Image: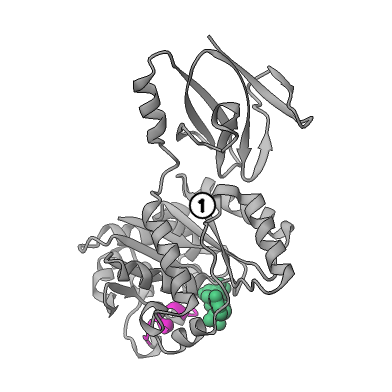
Amino acid sequence: MRTISIVNQKGGCGKTTTTVNLAGALAADGFSVLVVDMDPQAHASLALGINPDELDENLYEVLVEPAGATALSRIILNVSHGVDLAPAGIVLSALEQKLAAEHQEARTERLSRALDSLKPDYDFILIDCPPAVSLLTFNALRASQEVIVPLETSSFAVDGVQKLLETISLLMDRVGHSLSVRVLPTLYDGRTRYARETLGEIRELFRDLCFDSVVRLNVKIREAAQNGKPISLYAPKANGALDYAALAMEVSLGGPQVVASTTADNAESSNPEKREVVVEYRDSDAGDVRIAGDFNDWVPDRNVLSRVEAEGRTRVWVKVLSLPPGTYQYRYFVDGQWRVDPANQNSSAGPMGQTNSVLHVR
Ligand SMILES: Nc1ncnc2c1ncn2[C@@H]1O[C@H](COP(=O)(O)OP(=O)(O)OP(=O)(O)O)[C@@H](O)[C@H]1O
Ligand SMILES: [Mg+2]
């Protein structure tokens, strides 16, 4: 079971659309999916054909008391083939006030407890978050191992991205475990130069944290939501359906954890001359740390075994390289920015004039 939150504090960037239509596309591929609507606006519930005003109970009852966790299976509705829904309601907006007096830990783990109590084993749980960094979003992140951040390609500012990354690393600190974060360009209108440039900028900044899939602007997406169906059922041939099918493929192929490359394993076993080299990067603010150098053609984390450990509030990214003896240049790629290794005094100027860290393997 993989639990993925769809998060961005910016409104209208395609969170709900992505939750509902990725769910539909995964279900079309034969996966069982639960959509958890954590937004009091209940747009995901509406887009799946459920009118929240007609329900007696919703996630509020599940989250408001510790004992409510067991009510989750009671409120879940089957909304289309392969897709179940834990619906929201406007009353969810009262949760923050209601739980204000409780201990932070207890307040933020309500959803994760409730999901633990679930009997049916879903392949995917997708959580639609409100456009705010609120208690509801914290609950979603506590329950998740993965995050998808939809980014609108029509109004994009580098400032916004930095803020987003800061927010995510802050959230990661608070949720107490690592999250694998990927960004999804949405609302893409390839006819405008601005959108094309913006997409290029997003890809440049996020590199392989950015999905290859891009969701194009497509009126059928809006129509599908108005008709209460995922686009895979409403208009399966529309561009919107194709884009979310491509995303579903990428999501289902990519596991939640940071790369554990099989090529590195193979190379090691077939070449006993290689040495295992372990390097570590410590940081309490970073969200995603990869390593790249002349040993992997500067492709971040290619042929690298990677894991994240916690030392109090500091996270330690441990990178295991399998290298023949020699001298190598490398840098870390931290939240989309290149950094020299702060723990390594050895450095030299790279071909473009930048400073690289240097590693000697004997
Ligand atoms: N690819 C698309 N093509 C056309 N319309 C889209 C597309 N993606 C989203 N929309 C429309 O844009 C609007 C905003 O999308 P959506 O509700 O998914 O954003 P959101 O991030 O969930 O917003 P909020 O922050 O308010 O929850 C909706 O009306 C939706 O139907
Ligand atoms: Mg929404």
Total numbered circles: 1
In the image, residue 133 above or below residue 42: above
Q: Is residue 49 magenta?
A: yes
> Looking at the image, which residue is at 57% across and 70% down?
131
Give residue 118's quadrant in the image.
Answer: bottom left
The boundaries of the magenta stretch are 40-50
> Looking at the image, which residue is at 61% across and 71% down?
188
> Looking at the image, which residue is at 24% across and 70% down?
73
Q: Residue 64: x percent and y percent? A: 38, 69
User: What residue occupies the far right of the structure in this picture?
Assistant: 353
Q: Residue 342: x percent and y percent? A: 66, 26
Q: Residue 84: x percent and y percent? A: 30, 73
Q: Can residue 100 be seen in this view?
A: no
In the image, residue 136 above or below residue 252: below
Amino acid at the residue labelled 1: Val
User: What residue occupies the far left of the structure in this picture?
Assistant: 119
> Looking at the image, which residue is at 34% across and 66% down?
26
Q: Which colour scheme is used?
A: one colour
Query: Could you tell me which secondary element the residue under label 1 belongs to?
Result: strand
Q: Which of the two residues, 79 or 202, is positioned nearer the viewer here?
A: 202
Q: Is residue 168 magenta?
A: no
Q: Residue 63: x percent and y percent? A: 37, 67
Mark 1 is surrounded, within 10 Å at the Cα level, by few (under 14), some (14 to 19) or many (20 or more) other residues, namely: many
Q: Which of the two residues, 11 or 268, is positioned nearer the viewer here?
A: 268
Q: Quadrant of the N terminus?
A: bottom left
Give residue 116's quadrant in the image.
Answer: bottom left
> What residue sits right under mark 1 in the picture?
181
In the image, residue 108 above or below residue 242: above
Q: Can residue 214 be seen in this view?
A: yes
Give residue 71's quadrant in the image.
Answer: bottom left
